[in-house]
Image (spheres, rainbow, N blue to C red):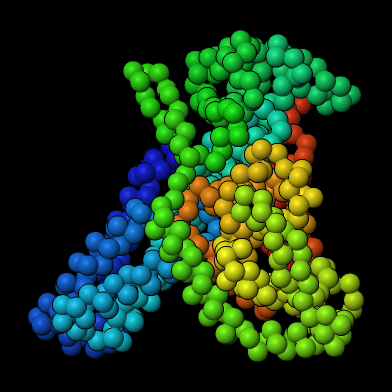
């Protein structure tokens, strides 16, 4: 954020300040739309609106800090930002209506409707404007050129997270690949492809020649003398040095940095949820599941009759692992995935995820939740690493953060775990509602897109990008989580 002259916390503050200014402007515009311009000299109209404006300021400031409504939490995605802002504006309008009723302060409901609509439009315009500004500066080269020292899962994870956070104004331009021994750093020769050793001094010359601003250590063992020497020399030459703490299995924890007289101590605290949150989440699951089952009952009955006539069976039960690995039978419409036949209806049902509607019954039984990690088969769970097994510590869901990012059943468990653990780090009803809204948006987009099979392209992070000797390789990362047409 140094390129903008703002720190991340300052950026959040400026977005909130812009939101509060827009609240006043939206109130004036809403009143003009309702009454025209004649009201501007009527003191009674001003006095009746002032308590609503003050309440909006206070409530929106609390929501902004409590729910991180700046739009960049978890990485920029328009649908995620829109759903979060929509939910927050809806809560704000509900608060204004309830407060007005309890205090016997009444204003035009139409004007309040205009006010809520203008709030949403203005707040989204602010966040999209900030994103456009960041993108413009990024395209003009105003970003930190970053090199990651490390390979494997940690380095790939770090590169993808940096890509999804444009507010960092940071670009990963390459990786340094360590040799098998801790005493050397290896770089493949561009002509022959053979691995050659490069001294620390040679690496420094290469970093300086390519105007690298930041070096991030993402090694499992980053305390080797050569690595520490490289980090020290980089700091002396003005290259910022970052460090991913190890072991990485502590991912499902909240880090807190303690500066003890210049000695950094990183505390890891496991995320915890209260019994009240669990009760509220279960209540929301039951309420929404019953509502959705009543709403979709005609569709499910029609499809069940059609599938029973066509295949002899309407539903299928699939064995899945739920909370703490407990086995349960997950319901699904009897349609292959992907559909094996040429039935256009089956392909459409799979594309729109209607095959998952019977899982609302699993939610009512308490085996699943509306939002959570997608459950997987026992044979796949048996191959979990300890890191992946953390996703079994919460109840599985029909949809989740991985699904709205386009990560489906055909993807690896590691890709799913990456997003599932991110969701588990910030458990809240607002996040759940936001993900449900994003899921509805995803289904709506699939509905209006041309009806055809879509196969997305994925970036390949299986092999590390390295620095060829004598030449600096810039890798343009692609989004490995583009939406796919498959269900789940």
The residue positioned 61% from the left and 44% from the top of the image is 390
Q: In the rendered image of this protein, does residue 14 appear above or below residue 267? A: below
The residue positioned 68% from the left and 75% from the top of the image is 358
Q: In the rendered image of this protein, does residue 348 appear above or below residue 188? A: below
Q: Quadrant of the C terminus?
A: bottom right
- Given residues 114 and 373, the one toward you in this image is 373
Q: Position of residue 392 (x, y in %)?
A: 62, 49
- Given residues 400 and 56, the one toward you in this image is 400
Visible in this render: residue 123?
A: yes
- Given residues 40 and 228, the one toward you in this image is 228
Q: Is residue 265 left or right of residue 109?
A: right
Q: Is residue 289 left or right of residue 298?
A: left
Q: Position of residue 350 (x, y in %)?
A: 76, 73
Q: Quadrant of the N terminus?
A: top left
Q: Position of residue 288 (x, y in %)?
A: 51, 75
Q: Position of residue 21 (x, y in %)?
A: 27, 63
Visible in this render: residue 166?
A: no
Where on the picture, by quarter, is residue 485? bottom right
The residue positioned 71% from the left and 33% from the top of the image is 152
The residue positioned 37% from the left and 50% from the top of the image is 12
Q: In the rendered image of this protein, does residue 287 appear above or below residue 108? A: above
């Amino acid at each position: 954020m140094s390129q903008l002259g703002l720190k991340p916390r300052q950026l959040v503050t400026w977005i909130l300040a812009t939101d509060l200014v827009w609240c006043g402007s939206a109130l004036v515009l809403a009143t003009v739309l309702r009454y025209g311009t004649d009201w501007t000299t009527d003191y009674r109209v001003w006095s009746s609106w002032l308590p609503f404006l003050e309440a909006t300021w206070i409530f929106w400031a609390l929501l902004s800090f409590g729910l991180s409504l700046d739009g960049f939490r978890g990485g920029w995605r328009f649908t995620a930002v829109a759903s979060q802002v929509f939910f927050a504006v809806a809560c704000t309008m509900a608060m204004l209506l309830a407060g007005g009723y309890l205090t016997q302060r009444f204003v035009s409901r139409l004007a309040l409707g205009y006010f809520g609509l203008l709030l949403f439009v203005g707040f989204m315009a602010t966040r999209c404007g900030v994103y456009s500004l960041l993108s413009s500066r990024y395209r003009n080269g105003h970003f930190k050129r970053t090199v990651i020292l490390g390979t494997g899962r940690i380095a790939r994870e770090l590169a993808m997270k940096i890509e999804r956070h444009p507010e960092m104004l940071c670009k990963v331009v390459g990786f340094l690949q360590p040799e098998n021994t801790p005493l050397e750093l290896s770089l493949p020769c561009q002509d022959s492809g053979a691995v050659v050793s490069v001294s620390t001094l040679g690496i420094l010359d290469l970093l300086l020649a390519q105007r690298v601003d930041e070096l991030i250590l993402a090694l499992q063992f980053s305390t080797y003398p050569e690595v520490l020497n490289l980090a020290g020399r980089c700091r002396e030459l003005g290259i910022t040095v970052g460090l991913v703490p190890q072991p990485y299995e502590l991912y499902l924890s909240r880090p807190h940095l303690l500066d003890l007289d210049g000695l950094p101590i990183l505390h890891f605290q496991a995320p915890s949820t209260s019994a009240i949150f669990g009760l509220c989440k279960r209540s929301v699951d039951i309420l929404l599941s019953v509502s959705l089952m009543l709403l979709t009952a005609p569709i499910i009955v029609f499809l069940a009759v059609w599938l029973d006539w066509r295949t002899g069976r309407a539903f299928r039960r699939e064995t899945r692992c739920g909370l703490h690995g407990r086995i349960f039978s997950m319901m699904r419409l009897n349609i292959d995935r992907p559909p094996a036949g040429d039935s256009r209806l089956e392909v459409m049902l799979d594309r729109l995820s209607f095959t998952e509607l019977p899982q609302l019954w699993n939610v009512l039984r308490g085996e699943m939740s509306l939002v959570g990690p997608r459950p997987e088969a026992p044979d796949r769970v048996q191959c979990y690493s300890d890191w992946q097994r953390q996703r079994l510590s919460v109840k599985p869901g029909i949809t989740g953060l991985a699904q709205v990012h386009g990560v489906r059943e055909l993807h690896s468990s590691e890709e799913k775990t990456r997003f599932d653990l991110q969701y588990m780090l910030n458990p809240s009803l607002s996040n759940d509602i936001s993900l449900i809204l994003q899921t509805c948006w995803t289904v709506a987009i699939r509905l209006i897109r041309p009806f055809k099979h879509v196969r997305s392209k994925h970036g390949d992070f299986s092999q590390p990008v390295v620095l060829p000797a004598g030449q600096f390789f810039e890798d343009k990362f692609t989004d490995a989580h583009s939406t796919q047409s498959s269900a789940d």
